[in-house]
Image (spheres, grey):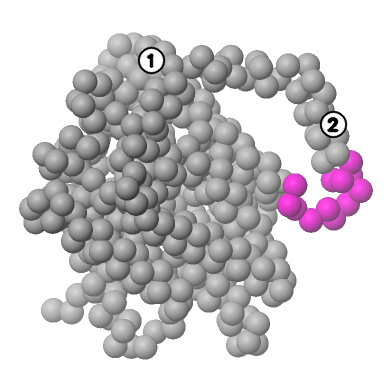
């Protein structure tokens, strides 16, 4: 029987990636393992299928993945000797980084459908469903004391709180949802996208309470707004007016007000604790270890656990380090992980402008700025956000392929739905 891998598997990976199956059974760690195995199997099929058929592909897609795999192999072999990792521990440590292979099937499906907006719609619908379920279980617990979807509500345990209030994660793809929604709104002028954006910001403020994501989302929207073409005097006046109002508000204490409401004062215990963590983890890089890092760490290995948690007298988390988490584990090799992706997206933006594909450039600018802002406090390659990397990579490569053919005059270009609802 001929096996065909199609949209079903792409959707399934996205659904698992944003945690929707947690409403039925299983814990987060189990679903992360299932996600890893599924991505590997689907990617192998796609590599075999499209390698034989000589399907058009992005050279950067494979170069980036090939180098990432090389970095992972180098670090994990080093870890095996240093920390005595078992085969299972190696797999466990590599799980989130193996998700990079998801870029391959996702890229080919976008190219096969010849429609990037189809996948914009798929992504924002799946993510919004997940956020809706998370908001529902959070609301029931907060206001009625009823626990619904226990594994979703306590995805990171019952101690994942802020100021004594339970928090629920915003999923790895929240950073892709923001620029997609704004892109769709500006293109199709439909109010539903404004409502979706408002709901997303509500979620970040009250449910997730992740300050870095909120600031990143605001920065993303702000940059996309001010990079729009000023096609009219009215729009230009509006932009200037917003800048003036913002400047006046800042002078009247807006920043101080936001910091107080979000508990962002310099005396914030969370910030102080991160400084403590940073000092400890920085001490691990002495003696030249900063060149290639201390390796990929996992808490299920005894030696790795001691390194992650220090003297074990207080809980510490690598995720608190932001982009420094990546540097801690990979050293100078982390420059490629971030730098190559950022430079490539910049290159595609410039290519879009040359080909008069300003819409795609508009989306990519927002996506790029979100990556840069959020990655400082929150590592993009951390396990909570790592699934976003292959999605961003696949979309950027697919847009690159489209624009490349446009420049060559092949007549190829992504389809668009003027109604703003891609089926």
Q: Position of residue 376 (x, y in %)?
A: 50, 41
Q: Position of residue 49 (x, y in %)?
A: 28, 81
- Please report the residue visible at 80 percent of the width from the left and 34 percent of the height from the top: 242
Depicted 275 relative to depicted 321: above or below: above
> In this figure, which residue is indicated by the disc labeled 2?
244
- Please report the residue visible at 60 percent of the width from the left and 68 percent of the height from the top: 347
| Among numbered discs 2 and 1, the one appearing first in the sequence | 1
Depicted 400 relative to depicted 252: above or below: below
Looking at the rendered structure, the secondary structure element under dot 2 is helix
* Residue 36 visible in rendering: no
* Residue 66 visible in rendering: yes
Q: Position of residue 186 (x, y in %)?
A: 68, 50
Looking at the rendered structure, the secondary structure element under dot 1 is strand
Q: Residues within 10 Å of mark 1 (few under 14, many from 20)?
A: few
User: Is residue 106 toward the left or the right of residue 338 in the image?
Assistant: left
Determine the CA span between mark 2 and mark 1: 36 Å
Would residue 43 be counted in the magenta stretch? no
Q: Residues within 10 Å of mark 2 (few under 14, many from 20)?
A: few
Which quarter of the figure has residue 274?
A: top left
Quarter of the figure with the N terminus: bottom left
Residue at the limit of the structure toward the front, as seen here: 287
Q: Position of residue 213 (x, y in %)?
A: 50, 36
Which region shows up in magenta? 226-237
- Label disc, if present, on residue 165 of the rendered structure: 1
Would residue 230 be counted in the magenta stretch? yes
- Please report the residue visible at 18 percent of the width from the left and 35 percent of the height from the top: 306
User: Is residue 71 toward the left or the right of residue 128 in the image?
Assistant: left
Is mark 2 in CB contact (under 8 Å) with mark 1? no
Question: Is 420 in front, or is 15?
Answer: 15
């Amino acid at each position: 029987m001929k096996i065909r891998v199609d949209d079903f598997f792409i959707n399934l990976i996205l659904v698992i990636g944003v945690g929707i199956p947690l409403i039925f059974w299983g814990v987060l760690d189990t679903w992360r393992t299932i996600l890893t195995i599924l991505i590997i199997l689907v990617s192998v099929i796609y590599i075999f299928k499209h390698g034989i058929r000589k399907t058009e592909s992005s050279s950067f897609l494979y170069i980036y993945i090939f180098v990432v795999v090389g970095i992972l192999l180098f670090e994990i072999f080093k870890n095996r000797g240093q920390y005595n990792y078992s085969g299972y521990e190696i797999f466990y440590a590599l799980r989130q980084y193996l998700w990079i292979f998801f870029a391959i099937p996702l890229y080919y499906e976008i190219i096969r459908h010849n429609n990037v907006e189809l996948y914009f719609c798929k992504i924002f619908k799946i993510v919004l469903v997940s956020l809706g379920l998370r908001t529902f279980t959070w609301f029931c617990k907060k206001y009625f004391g009823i626990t619904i979807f226990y594994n979703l509500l306590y995805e990171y345990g019952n101690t994942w709180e802020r100021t004594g209030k339970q928090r629920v994660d915003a999923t790895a793809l929240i950073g892709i949802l923001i620029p997609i929604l704004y892109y769709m709104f500006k293109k199709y002028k439909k109010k539903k996208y404004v409502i979706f954006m408002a709901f997303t910001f509500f979620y970040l403020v009250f449910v997730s309470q992740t300050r870095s994501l909120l600031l990143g989302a605001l920065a993303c929207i702000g940059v996309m707004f001010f990079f729009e073409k000023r096609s009219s005097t009215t729009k230009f006046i509006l932009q200037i007016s917003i800048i003036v109002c913002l400047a006046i508000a800042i002078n009247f204490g807006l920043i101080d007000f936001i910091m107080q409401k979000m508990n962002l004062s310099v005396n914030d215990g969370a910030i102080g604790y991160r400084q403590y963590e940073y000092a400890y983890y920085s001490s691990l890089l002495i003696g030249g270890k900063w060149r290639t890092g201390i390796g990929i760490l996992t808490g299920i290995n005894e030696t790795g656990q001691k390194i992650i948690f220090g003297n074990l007298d207080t809980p510490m988390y690598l995720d608190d380090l932001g982009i420094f988490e990546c540097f801690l584990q990979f050293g100078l090799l982390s420059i490629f992980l971030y730098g190559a992706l950022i430079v490539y997206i910049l290159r595609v933006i410039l290519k879009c402008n040359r080909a008069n594909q300003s819409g795609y450039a508009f989306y990519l600018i927002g996506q790029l700025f979100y990556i840069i802002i959020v990655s400082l406090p929150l590592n993009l390659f951390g396990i909570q956000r790592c699934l976003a990397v292959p999605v961003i990579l696949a979309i950027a490569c697919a847009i690159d392929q489209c624009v490349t053919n446009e420049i060559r005059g092949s007549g190829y270009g992504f389809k668009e739905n003027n109604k703003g609802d891609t089926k």
